Image (spheres, rainbow, N blue to C red):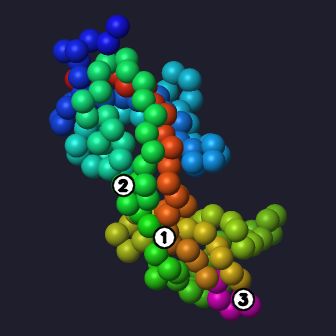
Amino acid sequence: MADKNRAAKKGSTVQISFMVMSEQGQVFEQSAKGHYLRFVVGEGQVVEGIDEAVAGMNEGESKTVTIPPEKGFGKRDERMMLRVPRSTLPVSTERPVKPGDYLFLRRKDGKEQQVKVIELRPDSALLDLNHPLAGITLKCQFRLEVVD
């Protein structure tokens, strides 16, 4: 039975086991058995839809929620396409870069960002900087544990 005194609220540290899918059931990501996603509720450490769904949940409770793009990874933005010199892409003799590949590029702030190769030309590449799950309505299943 769920412990009513162990409900998640803003500022609570929680951990969840989770599965993130498309509305059609394609699994994008899930936690490994015995591994959890740990975060502080209301601190923006996870997408808004999960933060909102967890608030008010009780210890041990399971839930399935549908998260629209605007509360998930955002809407796709066609302005987030970037053409770069092909010479800036990684070079490998074992496996050349091809359209559909995901790469990590270092941003000006020093962080790495995952991008998708959309098109290759002899001297340039078109990269999609949108999050891979941007524009997708997500279905998330999770089980909550209140840590603190």
Is residue 123 in the magenta section?
A: yes
Q: Residue at x 29, y 21 (%)?
A: 58
Q: Nearer the viewer, mark 1 or mark 3?
A: 1
Q: Which residue is the site of mark 1?
A: 76
At numbered mark 3, what does the secondary structure look like: helix, strand or loop? loop
Of the two numbered discs 2 and 1 on the same chain, state the one appearing first in sequence: 2
Q: Main secondary structure of the magenta part?
A: loop
Check disc 3: other Cα within 10 Å, few if <14, some if 14-19, many if 20+: few
- Quarter occupied by the N terminus: top left
Is 38 on the left-hand or right-hand side of 102? left
At numbered mark 2, what does the secondary structure look like: helix, strand or loop? helix
Residue 107, above or below 67: below
Q: Nearer the viewer, mark 3 or mark 2?
A: 2
Q: Position of residue 119 (x, y in %)?
A: 69, 81
Residue stretch in magenta: 121-125
Counting labels gives 3
Q: Which residue is the site of mark 2?
A: 71
Q: Residue at x 68, y 92 (%)?
A: 123
Q: Residue at x 68, y 66 (%)?
A: 101
Relative to the observer, which residue lies in front, 29 or 114? 29
Amino acid bearing label 2 = Lys
Q: Which residue is the site of mark 3?
A: 121
Are the two marked residues, 1 and 3, in contact with CB atoms closer than 8 angstroms? Answer: no
